[in-house]
Amino acid sequence: MEAIICACIKDQMVRIWSFQMKCDATGVLPPTIIWISPRNKIIPSSSVKYQILNDGTLIIKKLTLADQGKYACVAWNPAGDNIKNVNLLVEVKGPQIKGHSGRTENKILAVYYQTLLLDCKAEGMPEPQITWTTPYGMSLPTPYLGGRFQVHRNGTLELRGIRKTDEGRFLCIAKNYLGEASLAVDLEVASLDEKPSFPVPNTEVLSLEADGDDISLECRATGKPKPEFLWILPNGTAMSPGMKLQWFFHYLGNGTLHIMQTGVIDKGVYQCLAKNVARQAEKRYALEPGQKPHIRSTASTMKISGSYTCKATNTFGSSTLSYPKAIVYLFNSSHFKVVQFSSIIVLILQS
């Protein structure tokens, strides 16, 4: 009776470090199992790349794209032979950290004695191994638990009770046999934290012209650690640093919001939020359409024999208001004179 084979694997996409293919064969006389590679070569029973177990299972180590293809399991005995084919598809991918291969760098400012989580999300096929290295050369595998440091199974490094001595570069390395990727985190520790604050006033009112020039709204806040800035436009849109939206631009670093060619359409309240680990503060700018000056008159009707004129001017126009005068000299001598201003009589002493 010829050997009967049960090939327990059909076409498969493989995403693991090594792979096993079983080849169950039966017969009156125990069959001998031989595996043929996609290049039509007999696979040795034991080598750096392959291993064939006693039950006929083929193990392929350190899978690469070169390992994919059609494998043949041949079972034979003196009564005959039987062949089963298995098509193997391999997917491999070098390590990436947060979607980036090679090395990436980041800077973090933390507050003394707080807990900090440093993420190192790595992907790859096969799944990469993650290792952290501290500024003073200690290597932390995944997972790790010891003292104030812990590396979680997802690669996140937890630092508890941060101290000034923890400052420096923490290095995360994700590695598989295809290569490695790394993330360097430069940690700075602030001894004290200080809530952001603005120079007074916290609210300013600015006038808008119909066809005005550019306006820069400053958001100069101080605090420890240095605050991050966020602008909220009158319609509720949030603008993070470096963001440009239509004629609005939020500069990186200093928190300034630049508005190009302002007009009455830009009226409303603009909010700048300055935030750090110690809380946040807010500064507001109210942009209002400009109006020419208006002078309120409380003078009553007078008989006019001349007038005094008050004129007020700004960039939006001017207004005038005239006060009537009616001056009559009632008496004049070398020592004093009596003058009537409208209905008011004044005695003026002369030296």
Image: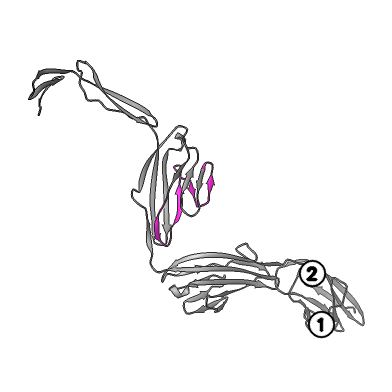
Q: Which mark is residue 167?
A: none
**Is 154 left, or right, of 77 in this rendering?**
left
Q: Would you name the residue on which mark 1 appears?
A: 45
Q: Quadrant of the C terminus?
A: top left
Give the residue type that dot 1 points to: Ser
The answer to the question of whether label 1 and label 2 lie on touching residues, with beta carbons closer than 8 A, is no
Location of residue 327 by image quarter? top left
Q: Residue at x 47, y 37 (%)?
A: 213
Q: In this view of the protein, which residue sits in the foreground, 184 or 54?
A: 184
Res. 163 in view:
no
* Magenta-tinted stretch: 219-247
Q: In this view of the protein, which residue sits in the foreground, 350 or 226?
A: 350
Q: Is residue 342 above or below residue 136?
A: above
Residue 323 image position (x, y, % from top left) = 23, 22
> How much space separates mark 1 and mark 2, taking CA atoms?
19 Å
Q: In this view of the protein, which residue sits in the foreground, 192 or 312?
A: 312
Could you tell me how many numbered marks the image carries?
2
Q: Is residue 227 magenta?
A: yes
Give the residue type that dot 2 points to: Ala
Q: Would you name the residue on which mark 2 appears?
A: 66
Res. 179 in view:
yes
Residue 279 image position (x, y, % from top left) = 39, 59
Residue density around tag 2, few if under 14, some if 14–19, many if 20 or more, within 10 Å: few
Give the secondary structure at mark 2.
helix
